[in-house]
């Protein structure tokens, strides 16, 4: 065999080996993609099913008589902490929840939390309550297992929201569901200006809340203690919250005010939580 023929043969052999190696790499890449999809698709499907479940609940059991008209006239308390247009312009009393029907589905429904602009802050959910903080961590209102779980009240709180300090939990979902859009408060300062309020509805009363602070805390923070009365210990908690807030809203609750804290994870550190604190500025009898 001539040197030229030998060179051609070696070149063909190298090309063949190169093709085989490329094919192996391609097959490996395809297998990795298929494996990733096999893990990802169930999660995406779970997100979609959970989102649809809660959207259907809002569509079926929430009636907004104001139909998004922010110019509607609501009965307003002259002693409310703020008379800002963004706070007082939404007729939160025009919203009604069919709790009788919801409780037939699940008697653990104790309320409904709803932000004024649900397109900006996608929080429009029933609030569940159980004797522990695990039951609804990954379970929806129907008892079905879902990654998103439910929005639920701290087990140590009183389910009628009569406590001075309440904590409500929700997952920080990547698709923005549950408490996933709360992160916008820490990312964009103007977000608070446009979305300072939300309402918690119960069977008998609608409670109007205005956000006064938000912060990142450890999961062992003092803010996860409940059972306060209007005393020095409660004042210390209020002072702590205001001093740690990422923004000075100019709102400082009094020791006789009722506060609710919305808690979610940060998706950065498993031991960290992002919390939004709001003070009750008004309430309306629904009976």
Image (cartoon, rainbow, N blue to C red):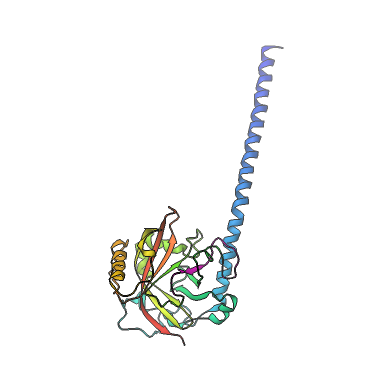
**What residue is drawn where x is 62% and y is 36%?**
25
Q: Is residue 278 above or below residue 173?
A: below
**In this rendering, position of residue 10 left or right of residue 80:** right
**Of residues 150 and 115, which is closer to you in this image?**
150
In the figure, residue 61 lies in which quadrant?
A: bottom right
Estimate the x, y position of residue 88 in percent, counting from the top left.
Answer: 36, 79
Can residue 41 be seen here? yes
**Which residue is at the front of the view, 35 or 232?**
232
Percent coordinates x, y for residue 59 in the rendering: 56, 75
From the viewer's perspective, is residue 30 above or below residue 248?
above
Q: Which residues are magenta?
A: 140-158
* Total marks in image: 0
Determine whether, in the image, residue 209 is placed left or right of residue 23: left
Judge whether residue 98 can be spotted in this image. no
Residue 144 colored magenta? yes
Report if residue 238 lies within the magenta region. no
The N terminus, quarter of image: top right
Where is residue 265 shown, x and y percent of the image? 44, 59
**Which residue extends farthest bottom?**
287
Q: On the rendered structure, is 265 left or right of 242?
A: right
The image position of residue 9, as x and y in percent, is 69, 19
Q: Residue at x 47, y 79 (%)?
A: 202
**Residue 221 horizontal side relative to residue 254, left or right:** right
Q: Quadrant of residue 57?
A: bottom right
What's the magenta bit mostly, secondary-structure-wise? loop
Residue ranking furthest to the right: 1
């Amino acid at each position: 065999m001539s040197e030229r023929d030998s060179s051609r043969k070696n070149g063909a052999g190298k090309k063949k080996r190169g093709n085989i190696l490329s094919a192996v790499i391609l097959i490996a890449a395809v297998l990795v993609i298929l494996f990733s999809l096999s893990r990802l698709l169930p999660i995406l499907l779970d997100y979609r099913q959970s989102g649809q479940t809660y959207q259907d609940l809002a569509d079926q059991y929430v009636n907004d008589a104001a139909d998004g008209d922010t110019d509607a006239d609501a009965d307003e308390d002259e002693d409310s902490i703020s008379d800002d247009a963004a706070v007082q312009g939404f007729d939160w009393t025009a919203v009604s929840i069919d709790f009788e029907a919801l409780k037939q589905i699940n008697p653990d429904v104790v309320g409904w939390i709803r932000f004024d602009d649900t397109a900006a802050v996608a929080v429009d959910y029933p609030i569940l309550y159980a004797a522990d903080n695990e039951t609804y961590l990954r379970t929806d209102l129907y008892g079905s297992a879902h990654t998103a779980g439910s929005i639920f009240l701290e087990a140590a709180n009183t389910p009628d929201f009569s406590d001075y300090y309440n904590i409500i939990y929700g997952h920080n979902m990547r698709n923005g569901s549950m408490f996933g859009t709360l992160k916008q408060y820490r990312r964009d300062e103007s977000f608070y200006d446009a979305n300072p309020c939300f309402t918690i509805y119960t069977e008998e009363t609608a409670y109007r809340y205005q956000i006064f602070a938000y912060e990142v805390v450890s999961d062992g923070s003092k803010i996860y203690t409940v059972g306060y009365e209007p005393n020095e210990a409660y004042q210390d908690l209020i002072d702590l919250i205001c001093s740690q807030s990422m923004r000075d809203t100019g709102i400082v609750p009094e020791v006789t005010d009722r506060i609710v804290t919305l808690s979610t994870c940060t998706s950065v550190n498993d031991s960290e939580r992002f919390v939004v604190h709001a003070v009750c500025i008004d309430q309306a009898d629904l009976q």
